[in-house]
Structure formats: structure tokens, C-alpha cells
């Protein structure tokens, strides 16, 4: 963010002072600190910044209240691009020497850069109270007012400064920014032109005018100014960077590449420019060129480990995991707290399903680097892996807040929104991601899928066809196109598309599933469908997914033993796929082979210990076998994996409420948690009502049961519970009416005999 000040120039001492350093040092601390300061100035004359820093630190160590040394150290840190260290020194210098207005102004600017506007304003007002016409303070205060939207105050302040020094080009630049914010564009342009007229040897004046033209959608004017800037400052990369941004805004990739290369050539020792070029090549899917730029950036970087960490991250994102791990390990061996390397470590943890470990690292990075966007993306991935989409989306929104141009965060947010049925959000975020990065295939696919989900089949077809033309062998695109044809009733096109998909990827179970559906609509019998599946398995005999599909077909054909055999084969071929175990357990449970079903779930949990579905299946079987203690343990364990998982919270609440000496307070907490997550589920509402009933809160119970009946009025057990609550309130006649209606309903009602006995008892009381 450009504020006002030009790059800081550390003040040098006179030749007389420099020569005096050659004489011996005194043992007097007061003299020694001065000697260290003088040595620092000599080093700065020779551009030896690190040596100067050491001398200045020595001076401060002798006398922590040595304002001049702290001031010079702050200026040096500012020049080196280390604002946090600069702030610490300049703040102390300003405090120790209130007459040092420059230290105060620079501290105020750093406050403003950190978005601490009130702290900045306070310091500036202190200066203006003593020097009402201090132009630097007035200019920076105008920036504060500008950022707070106080445009009139900002303009008044900068005009006040200009009244004293009308020939100061920097003040005209600030005035141009204020007028632009006020949408007084002709006047703003004149202010920027005036700044340039006053000093054509200041690069900032060119840059501000070019930025103004870019914002006003006048790229030709901007380019003209930037070309003049490049001629005036051949060693500056800035004009080429701004020209590259114009090129990218107009999708002129070749020109952008050329200008980025020119920026690197202008300042070949600047590693950050090489990193910018590397990121450009990454977005253009040119990994070889990107890797080369990362390596060249390492050669010129002052802190090589930071750039090496970015290369490790690049390797990870491109599936070169061994290289990423090796480089990450090298960095962490030297710098165990290196932020970039720890980010890569967290990414590895998400890939290895060690999401708690990933979150532990990421939360530390977010604490230490709250303005860094990338950790929030990894945090979102970890939460998404844990099926916690709410926290994943919150992390992505924070990443986007920090960096609105973070295309990958928007792309993932679009994908998660699509999964949750938030189709308009998915469209918006995917479209924005594509605007930022037109080559973002994942966002383009999500946008097409969102169009399909909202039944805009014409647009979806167009987008899928366009993607297919670019990536003719991508099975995700073919799958989406096939589904679109299916939804449009174009079965022949759908059949051709899914057939092509299976030609490219013979083990694609989804593609075969849709071909089977089409065949079924065309009159194919179950035997024909089985033959189709077996023929496809012959083409991909190692596919566990196709075996699961075959098992499902056998199950539909009422051949459970053959289904179990197919699921068993799927487990042998793909032991990590949980679906085969779940399906086997379901079949075994239906056959009354509960012990074998439990064994299937336990086998699955040995491979996937955090599988919520497997734990839920196991808990349900424990309930069926009256192993209520084990069921409670299982549901409680699920809540350690996913604390807001409504089905587990609901079932555990019910079991606690029905247990001997129940902890009804805990049951109530769990039932309320479940309802908060799934407020429209009649069974969950019923559980909350039942806990209220057990607590003797009959009115609260009746309210919940009434909601449950309203949601699903064909379940007699819900009316039975409503009747019990009404009776508890003393509304006996209403209770009898509800229970009578419950007993007339035809749906299965396990408590029917019990309810009939209760009704007779109530009627006898009349």
C-alpha cells in the first residue's frame, strides 16, 4: 500500500566523524556507545547493512535509552523491509526523544500500515500540537482520514500542507489519491500530473498516475506513462510489473510474461521478482519454467530457507511429494520454526489424514502470522477432511477476507458450497475464481456442475462441451456431460458419453452405473444388467468399485450370498474402500448375522479408525443387540471425532435418557446439540421432547412433540409421545384424542400394545 513516504535514507555522518573512528576506543560506556554508532555509519557508507546493525545493537545494549541509535536502527530495518523490527526501534526512539518528529511520523505510518488508525492519529496530533504546519504530519493525517472515509477532512488537511509548500510533489500525489476517492476524477488527474510535472525524477509520481489510469479503465494512457517511467528509470522493475498487471487484466499472457521477465532483468538480484515470475508460470501451467525461477530466487535470496520452503510447497502442489518432503526436512533441520516449511508439513498431515496434527501446526501459524492467507486454506482442507464443512467454510472466508484475489480459496469454497447444495454461492465463487485465474480448471468444472444442479442444462452442456474440447480425456468432464445429456432426455448422447468414459477409464463404477440406468429405462432385465457389469469387470478385473456395483446388483436381484461374495472380492482388491465393508455389514445384519456384521465394521475401523459411518453402523448394531453400554461408548467416541455430529448426539441422548439413573442434564445438552444441527428432523425433535418429558418439563416436551408430529404426521410413535406430554400437563382429553389417532394409524408402531394399554387406563379414569 502506497502512503506517502519515499524509501528511507539513513543519515550518514560527516567525514570528520568518520575519521574519528580510526582512533582508539574509550572504556567510558558513554563514549563506547557513541563509538559503536560512528562505526555503524562507516559501515553504511560502504553499504554493509548487517555490520551496521551489529554496531547499532551494541550501542543500544550499552544504553537502552540511546534514542539516536534506536532511530538509526529503525531506519535501517525500514530500508531492509523489516517493518516489525523497524516499528519497535522507531517507537522507542520517538518515546525517548519527543523532539524527533521524523521518528514519530514513521511510527505513525507503521501504525497506519497495521490498520491501527487511532494510534497513528494520536501520534500525528501530538506533532501538530507543537508544529501545526508540519507538512509530513499533515500529509500522513490526510491518509488516515482517507482510510477512514473522511474525505473532506483529508482534503482540508492536504490543502493546508500545500498552502505552505505548493511545490512539494509528494503532497500533490496524496491530493490526487484523496480526490480520486471522492470521485472527482478530472481534478485527481490534474493533481497527479502536477506531481509529475514538479519532479520527473521521482518514480512514485509516474506509478501513481499510471495506477490512476488503470483504475479508470484507461490502459493506453497507463501504458504510455509506464513506458516513460521505464525510460527514466531503467533499473526499476516497477513499470514492468504494472504493465504486466495491465496485460493480465486484458488476458494478454504473452505480453505479461515478457514484462515480468523485463522486471527481473531490471533488478536481477531481487528474489521476490523471480518468485512473482514463478507464480505466474505456475498459474499458466508451466511447471518447468516455474521451478527454474524458484531455484534462481534461492540463489539471490538473503534468507534462502524461506524461498526453499516456497519451492517445497510448489513440489507438494504438483504431486512431487518426495522432493517436497526432502526439501522440507532440510529446512526444518536448520530452522524448526520456519513458517513456510511448517505449512508444507501441515499439508502432508492433511494428505495422510492426520488432520488434528495439521490443525495444531496451522493454528500456531495463524497465531504468529494472522495476516497470512495460506494457512487458512490448509485449515479448511483439514476441517473438510473431518467432514466439518462449517469450520472449513469459515476458514476459507477468512482467507478471502485477507486476500480477495486468492483463487484457490474461492475455488474450494465453491466446491464445498456445491456439496452442501448452496448452488448460488458455488456459482459466484467459482466464477470469481475463474475471473482471477482463467486457467483454473477445477473452478470451471464446479461452475458447470453448479449450472447442472440448478437445472440450467443448456448452460451446463455448453460449459462441459467447452471443457471436453480442452481436456478430451478428463473423466470428470465426461461424467458431468453424460449426466447433463441424461437430464435433458438425450439418452443416446448420454450413452455415447459414458461409453467413452469407460473406454478411457474402464474401472469407473459411476460411469457404468449410469449406463446400467439407461439400459434399465430401455427395458433391460436384471439378468442383462448383471451381464453388463460382468463384461465390464472383465475389462477391469482389479477394480474394487465394479465389484461393489456387482454386489449391489445381486442385492437388488435378491441374491444376498452372491452380493456378499462380491463385497468380499471388493475388500480383497481395494481394502481401503469403506463401502464394501459397510454393505457387507448391512447385508449380514439383515440376515440376522449380527456378530458377523459387527466384525465387518470392526475390520473397517482397523483401517479407518475415524470413519464416522462405520462407528454409527457399529453403534446401531450394539443397540439392536441390547449392548447399550457399548453403544453409548461408540456414540460418545464419534463425538470426539466430530463434536457436532447430530445422529450420534441424538442416539446418545436417547440412550442416556433411557438408562438407569440417567444424567438428564447431559442428555438435554446432547439433544439440543442434535436439534441445532438438524432442526427439521422429526426423530431428533422427538428425542429432545423425550428428554424434556423425562425431566418432568411437560410443556417443553409437548412443544417439541407437536413440532415432530407437524414434520411427519404419519408416525404413530410421535403422537403417542405427544399424548404422554399432554397427559403430564393435565390435558387428559387432548391426550386421549392424540393417542386414539395414533392407534388408528397403519404404520409400524413397536409400542402399539403399550399405547393401547395406556389408552384403556386413561379412558377408565374418565
Image: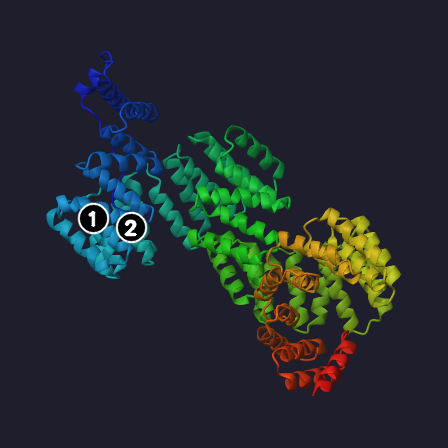
Q: Quadrant of residue 154?
A: bottom left
Q: Is residue 261 left or right of residue 217?
A: right
10 Å neighbourhood of mark 1: few (<14), some, or many (≥20)?
Answer: many
Q: Residue at x 47, y 52 (%)?
A: 399
Q: Residue furthest bottom?
A: 766
CA–CA distance between discs 2 and 1? 14 Å
Residue at the spot of label 1: 139
Number of numbered markers: 2
Q: 108 and 252: which one is in front?
A: 108
Residue 234 visible in rendering? no
Answer whether labels 2 and 1 touch (C-beta < 8 Å).
no
10 Å neighbourhood of mark 2: few (<14), some, or many (≥20)?
Answer: many
Q: 735 and 180: which one is in front?
A: 735
Q: In this view, does 384 lie to the left or right of 255?
A: right
Q: Which residue lies furthest to the top in this view?
A: 24
Above or below residue 456? Residue 620 is above
Quarter of the image with the C terminus in it: bottom right
Q: Is residue 251 left or right of residue 479?
A: left
Q: Percent from the top left, x then y, of residue 327?
A: 56, 33
Above or below residue 734? Residue 497 is above
Q: 649 and 75: which one is in front?
A: 649
Q: Percent from the top left, x then y, of residue 752?
A: 77, 77
Q: Percent from the top left, x then y, of residue 214?
A: 33, 54
Q: Which residue lies furthest to the left in this view?
A: 164
Question: Which structural element holds mark 1?
Answer: helix
Question: Which structural element holds mark 2?
Answer: helix
Residue at the spot of label 2: 117
Above or below residue 414? Residue 320 is above
In the rendered structure, which disc, 2 or 1, sits on the residue that comes first in sequence?
Answer: 2
Q: 208 and 726: which one is in front?
A: 726
Q: Percent from the top left, x then y, of residue 565?
A: 86, 56
Amino acid at each position: 500500500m502506497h502512503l506517502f513516504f519515499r524509501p528511507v535514507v539513513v543519515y550518514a555522518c560527516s567525514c570528520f566523524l568518520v575519521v574519528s573512528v580510526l582512533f582508539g576506543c574509550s572504556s567510558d560506556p558513554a563514549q563506547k556507545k557513541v563509538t559503536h554508532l560512528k562505526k555503524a555509519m562507516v559501515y553504511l557508507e560502504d553499504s554493509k547493512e548487517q555490520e551496521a546493525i551489529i554496531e547499532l545493537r551494541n550501542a543500544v545494549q550499552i544504553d537502552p535509552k540511546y534514542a539516536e541509535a534506536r532511530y538509526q536502527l529503525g531506519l535501517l530495518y525500514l530500508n531492509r523491509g523489516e517493518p516489525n523490527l523497524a516499528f519497535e526501534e522507531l517507537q522507542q526512539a520517538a518515546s525517548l526523544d519527543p523532539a524527533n518528529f521524523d521518528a514519530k511520523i514513521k511510527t505513525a505510518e507503521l501504525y497506519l500500515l497495521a490498520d491501527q488508525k487511532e494510534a497513528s492519529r494520536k501520534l500525528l496530533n501530538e506533532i501538530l500540537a507543537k508544529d501545526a504546519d508540519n507538512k509530513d504530519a499533515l500529509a500522513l493525517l490526510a491518509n488516515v482520514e482517507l482510510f477512514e472515509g473522511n474525505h473532506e477532512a483529508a482534503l482540508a488537511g492536504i490543502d493546508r500542507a500545500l498552502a505552505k509548500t505548493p511545490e512539494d510533489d509528494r503532497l500533490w500525489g496524496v491530493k490526487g489519491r484523496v480526490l480520486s476517492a471522492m470521485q472527482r476524477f478530472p481534478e485527481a488527474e490534474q493533481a497527479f500530473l502536477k506531481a509529475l510535472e514538479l519532479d520527473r525524477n521521482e518514480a512514485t509520481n509516474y506509478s501513481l498516475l499510471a495506477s490512476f489510469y488503470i483504475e479508470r479503465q484507461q490502459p493506453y494512457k497507463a501504458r504510455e506513462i509506464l513506458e516513460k517511467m521505464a525510460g527514466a528509470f531503467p533499473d526499476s522493475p516497477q513499470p514492468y510489473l504494472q504493465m504486466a498487471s495491465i496485460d493480465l487484466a486484458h488476458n494478454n499472457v504473452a505480453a505479461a510474461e515478457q514484462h515480468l521477465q523485463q522486471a527481473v532483468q531490471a533488478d536481477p538480484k531481487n528474489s521476490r521478482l523471480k518468485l512473482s515470475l514463478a507464480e505466474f508460470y505456475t498459474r499458466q501451467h508451466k511447471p518447468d519454467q516455474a521451478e527454474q525461477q524458484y531455484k534462481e530466487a534461492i540463489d539471490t535470496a538473503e534468507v534462502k530457507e524461506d524461498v526453499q520452503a516456497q519451492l517445497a510447497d510448489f513440489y507438494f502442489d504438483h504431486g512431487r511429494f518426495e522432493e517436497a518432503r526432502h526439501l522440507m526436512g532440510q529446512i526444518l533441520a536448520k530452522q524448526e520454526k520456519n513458517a513456510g516449511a511448517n505449512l508444507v508439513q501441515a499439508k502432508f498431515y492433511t494428505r495422510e489424514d492426520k488432520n488434528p496434527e495439521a490443525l495444531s501446526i496451522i493454528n500456531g501459524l495463524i497465531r504468529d502470522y494472522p495476516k497470512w492467507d495460506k494457512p487458512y486454506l490448509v485449515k479448511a482442507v483439514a476441517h473438510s477432511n473431518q467432514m466439518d464443512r462449517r469450520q472449513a467454510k469459515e476458514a476459507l472466508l477468512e482467507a478471502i477476507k485477507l486476500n480477495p484475489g486468492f483463487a484457490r480459496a474461492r475455488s474450494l469454497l465453491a466446491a464445498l458450497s456445491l456439496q452442501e447444495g448452496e448452488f448460488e454461492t458455488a456459482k459466484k465463487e467459482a466464477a470469481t475464481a475463474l475471473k482471477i485465474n482463467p486457467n483454473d480448471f477445477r473452478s470451471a468444472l464446479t461452475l458447470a456442475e453448479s449450472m447442472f444442479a440448478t437445472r440450467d442444462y443448456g448452460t451446463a452442456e455448453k460449459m462441459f462441451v467447452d471443457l471436453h474440447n480442452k481436456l478430451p480425456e478428463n473423466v470428470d468432464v465426461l461424467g458431468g456431460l453424460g449426466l447433463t445429456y441424461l437430464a435433458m432426455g438425450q439418452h443416446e448422447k448420454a450413452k455415447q458419453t459414458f461409453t467413452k468414459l469407460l473406454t478411457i477409464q474402464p474401472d469407473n463404477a459411476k460411469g457404468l452405473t449410469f449406463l446400467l440406468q439407461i439400459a434399465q429405462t430401455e427395458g433391460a432385465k436384471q439378468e442383462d444388467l448383471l451381464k453388463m457389469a460382468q463384461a465390464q469387470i472383465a475389462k477391469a478385473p482389479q477394480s474394487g468399485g465394479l465389484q461393489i456395483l456387482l454386489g449391489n446388483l445381486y442385492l437388488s436381484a435378491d441374491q444376498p450370498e452372491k452380493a456378499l461374495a462380491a463385497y468380499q472380492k471388493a475388500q480383497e482388491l481395494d481394502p481401503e474402500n469403506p463401502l464394501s465393508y459397510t454393505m457387507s455389514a448391512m447385508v449380514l445384519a439383515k440376515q440376522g448375522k449380527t456378530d458377523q456384521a459387527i466384525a465387518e465394521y470392526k475390520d473397517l475401523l482397523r483401517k479407518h479408525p475415524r470413519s464416522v459411518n462405520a462407528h454409527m453402523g457399529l453403534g446401531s448394531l450394539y443397540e439392536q443387540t441390547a449392548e447399550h453400554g457399548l453403544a453409548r461408548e461408540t456414540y460418545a467416541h464419534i463425538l470426539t471425532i466430530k463434536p457436532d455430529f447430530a445422529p450420534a448426539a441424538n442416539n446418545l441422548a436417547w440412550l442416556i435418557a433411557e438408562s438407569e439413573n440417567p444424567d438428564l442434564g447431559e442428555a438435554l445438552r446432547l439433544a439440543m446439540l442434535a436439534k441445532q444441527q438438524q432442526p427439521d428432523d422429526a426423530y431428533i425433535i422427538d428425542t429432545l421432547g423425550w428428554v424434556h418429558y423425562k425431566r418432568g418439563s411437560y410443556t417443553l416436551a409437548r412443544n417439541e412433540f407437536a413440532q415432530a408430529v407437524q414434520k411427519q404426521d404419519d408416525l404413530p410413535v410421535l403422537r403417542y409421545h405427544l399424548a404422554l406430554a399432554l397427559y403430564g400437563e393435565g390435558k387428559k382429553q387432548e391426550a386421549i384424542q392424540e393417542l386414539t389417532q395414533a392407534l388408528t394409524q397403519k404404520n409400524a408402531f413397536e409400542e402399539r400394545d403399550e399405547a393401547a394399554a395406556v389408552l384403556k387406563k386413561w379412558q377408565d379414569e374418565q
